[in-house]
Amino acid sequence: MSGKFELKKSSNGQFHFNLKAGNGEIILSSEMYTTHAAALNGIESVRKNAPTDERYERKNAKNGQPMFNLKAANHQVIGSSEMYSSERAREEGIESVKKNAPGAALDDEA
């Protein structure tokens, strides 16, 4: 089973999406978008930027756990990972986004 984007509308009326791997695990989460169209543009930006290693900002969260942000060409964050137990696990997460995002289906629940 391949990855998919799940697009949802929040209770506050804004939109957000998650990229899920084939096993159903969330591997990337978006920020909130004010419109459905903006969220769709965010998904397309993830598809476009995911294969490029330079677009990944590898960092540690405030609690010290490894995580990453995926950035667009303009350096704006378009998605963030969950926290990982190790730097190796973070690299595996990045590889999963690179593999899954470009061809991921869209499940538009908004």
Image: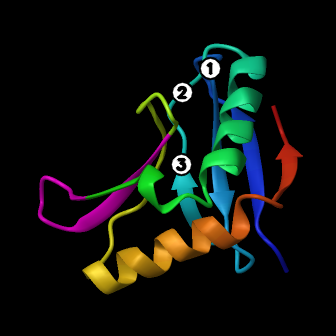
Colouring used for the render: rainbow
Q: Residue at x 53, y 48 (%)?
A: 29
Whichever of labels 3 and 1 marks the residue nearer the N terminus, that label is 1
Camera-side mark, 3 or 1: 3
Where's the C terminus, which quadrant?
top right
- Residue 63 painted magenta: yes
Dot 1: element: loop
In this view, the residue farthest toward the left is: 63
The answer to whether the residue labelled 1 contacts the one labelled 2, judged by CB atoms less than 8 Å apart, is yes
Q: Is residue 89 above or below residue 36?
A: below
Badge 1 local density, few (<14 within 10 Å), some, or many (20+)? some
Q: CA distance from mark 3 to mark 1?
A: 14 Å
Mark 3 highlights which residue? 29
Please identify the dominant SS of the magenta region: strand
Return the disc, 1 or 2, that comes first in the chain's sequence. 1
User: Disc 1 versus disc 2: distance between alpha carbons?
Assistant: 6 Å
Q: Amino acid at mark 2?
A: Met
The part of the chain drawn in magenta is: 59-71
Instruction: Establish if 72 lies above or below 24.
Output: above
Q: Quadrant of residue 83?
A: bottom left
Q: Which residue is mark 2?
A: 32
Residue at 51% in and 35% down: 73
Q: Residue at x 78, y 60 (%)?
A: 4
Which numbered tag is attached to residue 88? Answer: none
Q: Could you say whether the residue bearing mark 3 is in a helix, strand or loop?
A: strand
> Residue 40 appears at what percent x and percent y?
76, 30
Q: Residues within 10 Å of mark 3 (few under 14, many from 20)?
A: many
Left or right: 105 with respect to 49? Answer: right
Q: Residue type at mark 1: give it.
A: Gln
Residue 14 numbered mark, or none: 1
